[in-house]
Image (cartoon, grey):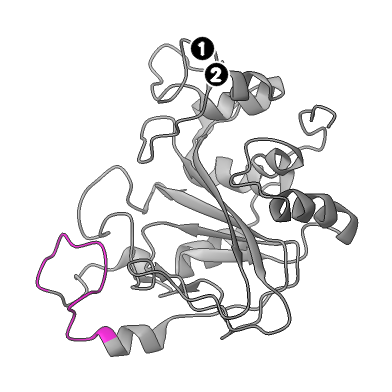
Amino acid sequence: MTATKDHTTAPIPMTDEQKFFFDLHGWIMLPSVLSADEIEPLKKEVYDGAKQSYQGELQTLLDHPAVSGILSEILAEEPYLGEDYYSYRCESSFITVRPPGWEKPQGTSTPHVVRPPQQANAMRYQVAGNKIFSGLTRVVWELEEVKAGLGGTTFLSGSHKAHFNYGGPDPYRPNISESAWEDSLHKTMAEYSCPAGSVIIFTESLLHAANDWTNPDNARCAVFNCYNSLWAQWHRVNLSHEAIEAMPPKRRTLFRGVWELGGNKEYSEDNRAL
């Protein structure tokens, strides 16, 4: 396979409409970002056994122009933006293929968050000075069609800004288990439909859940990439220097170390996130 290159298309800025609905709901959908011709080689890599998007053509999704402008808007700020490096980091990637009849695993089926938004922490969603800071943020590339009610990820829209806990016995618990309102919360979860090649972006402060895949027409084939600011880390990346070094220069900066004072702009073996 030929080596991939940095994207030559400029990042697409986040629109005011997208900011409004992302802040309101905690998630947005970008329909039909990829064409059928772009989707096919990505699906081939997935169905051939790829487990994450750090290699091959799948790595082009890490910093696709359709999402890189949005991620800069919700994870970075003006003094730290640049043309030759990304102003945020990637810290996790996994791929899922869910055939018809796939059943959700224990744990992820319960609506959950990275940390409850009612608690002060570096992962939580917040807005200050007319600026969004999304905290830990997930980007999902749907490479097959998703039909509402048949197994896509669901969200409790607006819960990323909840000021009260979920009704359970432990205010620090990052899910709704044992909540007296658990049934009501499940019924309130939002669903989506989208064509293949669409993108879902959500803050991990938003209650979200996996669901049984019951779509009889196709499997769910999705790439889940996770991002964070330059100053915080939740996942251990566990990505080798050799794998990062094989990427084009700007993409490598997604995996640089977690610090900023003095200017953290380049990736190197000595400046690699753990």
Picture disc at residue 269: 1
Give how far across and how far down residue 270 sits, in percent: 46, 10
Question: Seen in the image, is 65 located left or right of residue 17?
Answer: right
The stretch drawn in magenta includes residue 178: yes
User: Residue 24 magenta-drawn?
Assistant: no
In the rendered image, the quadrant that contains the N terminus is top right
Location of the C terminus by quadrant is top left
In the structure shown, which secondary structural element does the residue marked by tag 1 occupy? Answer: loop
Quick check: can you spot residue 131? Answer: no
Residue 77 x %, y %:
49, 35
**Can you see residue 194?**
yes
Q: Residue furthest left?
A: 169
| Residues drawn in magenta | 169-182
Label the magenta part by its dominant secondary structure.
loop
Classify 161 as above or below 9: below
Mark 2 and mark 1 in contact? Answer it, CB < 8 Å: yes
Residue 101 sits above or below residue 273 on the image: below
Give the crowd class for mark 2: few <14, some 14-19, many >=20 residues within 10 Å. some
Q: CA distance from mark 2 to mark 1?
A: 6 Å
| Number of numbered markers | 2
In the rendered image, which residue does mark 2 sit on? 241
As drawn, is 36 to the left or to the right of 101? right
Coordinates of residue 195 in the picture (x, y in percent): 75, 72
Residue 248 lies in quadrant: top right
Q: Residue 109's quadrant in the figure?
A: bottom left
Q: Amino acid at mark 1?
A: Glu
